[in-house]
């Protein structure tokens, strides 16, 4: 029996102020492309079942474009009669009970079995049972739901557990509504043929369990995610279980750092061969107030002009003999500016007013600057 497991596709996610030639946000289009790559792999592999462990959409109320895209792609699987079992993740679960879950709409497809009702559900086929545990807003009901799940394990069939959560604290994404699987119930895992997990955006097995896997996401939802192994899992269930991860092509995410003490030299010797269409982060370090003014964002963006997007970070060095509020090691322009106000304005009230004003203006600048998304 062959199963394809994928997860965290975040359809409708968009980022950066870049649009493609169809007027669609380029990162949003990247996420659609990644999803399509997995659908095409499914069509080539023709597995017996496909499972998706949550965060199909990035939002609980996705855009018309994201919904249309998902329906068009899932329809391709429906035509081939490939069953798709899908659970809701924290991103696709409404926070109030008044809004209706988007996965309910997808259930109108003949091949889709979706679990979104914030409770354990057993989804049974002739040779296999999927024990679906979607995202649950009220964690207090989890222990009872797990008891129900355990009681429903069918020894005559294959048993697959599906969840969208952090198993142990290691897989927390620091997002609203995420939940941690209760440690004392990890005993259920070995009673399953496979435990399919979503939420964590990297592929890998969990702890000492040989059959518990995060499929990982199909794209990067943050520039901090430097993993290149985005894709899907193929699971072969026979007498033994084999689990293999298959990567899909991904836009490059590259980091550079430039020591601004040796700016000319370092800028001239940058390795730029992979920059075309990449997401680029450039750290300028050892900056002084004056070199920071000299080296403009425009100039840096010109060096990386073939990149899709360039994000610039500035790190200042502490100049000897210069008193900046005692011993701040590295400071931002905002901190530098505020320390200047506090040194040069004697009147406390006026100092406070200007400090407040400066913070307000810097916050505004961060909101409107497209580099800080
Ligand atoms: Mn996710």
Image: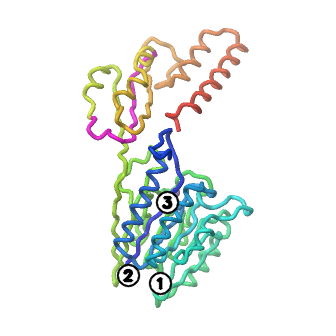
Please say whether residue 286 is one of the residues in the magenta stretch.
Answer: yes
The span from disc 2 to disc 3 (Cα, nearest Å) is 24 Å
Q: Which residue is mark 2?
A: 1
| Of residues 110 and 11, the one drawn nearer to the viewer in this rendering | 110
Which numbered disc, 2 or 1, marks the residue that appears first in the sequence?
2
Do the CB atoms of the residues marked 1 and 3 lie less than 8 Å apart?
Answer: no
Q: Tell me, what colour scheme is on the image?
A: rainbow
Magenta highlight range: 272-289
Q: Position of residue 235 (x, y in %)?
A: 37, 74
Q: Position of residue 329 (x, y in %)?
A: 46, 25
Height in image: 56 above or below 196? above
Q: Which residue is mark 1?
A: 128
Q: Quadrant of the N terminus?
A: bottom left
Q: Which residue is mark 3?
A: 8
Do the CB atoms of the residues marked 2 and 1 lie less than 8 Å apart?
Answer: yes
**Most extreme residue toward the front, as rendered?**
22
Task: Label 3, secondary structure: give it.
Answer: loop
């Amino acid at each position: 029996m062959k199963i394809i497991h994928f997860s965290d596709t975040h359809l409708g996610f968009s980022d950066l102020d870049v649009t493609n030639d169809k007027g669609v946000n380029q990162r949003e289009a990247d996420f659609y492309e990644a999803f399509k790559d997995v659908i095409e792999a499914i069509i080539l592999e023709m597995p017996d079942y496909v499972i998706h462990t949550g965060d199909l959409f990035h939002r609980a109320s996705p855009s018309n474009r994201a919904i249309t895209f998902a329906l068009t792609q899932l329809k391709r699987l429906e035509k081939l009669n490939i069953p798709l079992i899908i659970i809701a993740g924290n991103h696709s679960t409404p926070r109030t009970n008044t809004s209706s879950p988007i996965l309910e709409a997808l259930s109108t497809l003949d091949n889709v079995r979706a679990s979104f009702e914030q409770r354990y559900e057993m989804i049974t086929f002739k040779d296999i049972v999927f024990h679906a545990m979607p995202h649950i807003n009220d964690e207090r009901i989890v222990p009872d739901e797990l008891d129900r799940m355990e009681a429903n394990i069918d020894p005559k069939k294959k048993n697959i557990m599906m969840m969208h959560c952090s198993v142990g604290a290691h897989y927390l994404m620091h997002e609203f509504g995420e939940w941690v699987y209760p440690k004392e119930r990890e005993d259920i895992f070995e009673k399953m043929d496979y435990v399919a997990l979503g939420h964590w955006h990297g592929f890998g097995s969990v702890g000492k369990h040989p059959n518990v896997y995060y499929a990982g996401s199909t794209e990067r939802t943050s520039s901090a995610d430097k993993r290149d192994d985005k894709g899907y899992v193929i699971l072969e269930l026979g007498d033994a279980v084999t689990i293999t991860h298959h990567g899909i092509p991904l836009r490059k995410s590259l980091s550079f750092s430039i020591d601004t003490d040796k700016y000319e030299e370092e800028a001239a010797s940058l390795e730029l061969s992979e920059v075309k269409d990449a997401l680029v982060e450039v750290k300028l370090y050892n900056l002084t107030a004056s070199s920071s003014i000299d080296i403009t964002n425009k100039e840096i963006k010109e060096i990386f002009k073939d990149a899709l997007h360039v994000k610039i970070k500035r790190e200042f060095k502490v100049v000897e003999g210069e008193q900046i509020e005692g011993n701040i090691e590295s400071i931002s322009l905002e901190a530098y500016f505020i320390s200047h106000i506090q040194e040069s304005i004697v009147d406390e009230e006026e100092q406070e007013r200007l400090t407040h004003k400066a913070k307000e203006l810097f916050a505004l600048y961060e909101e409107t600057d497209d580099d800080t998304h």
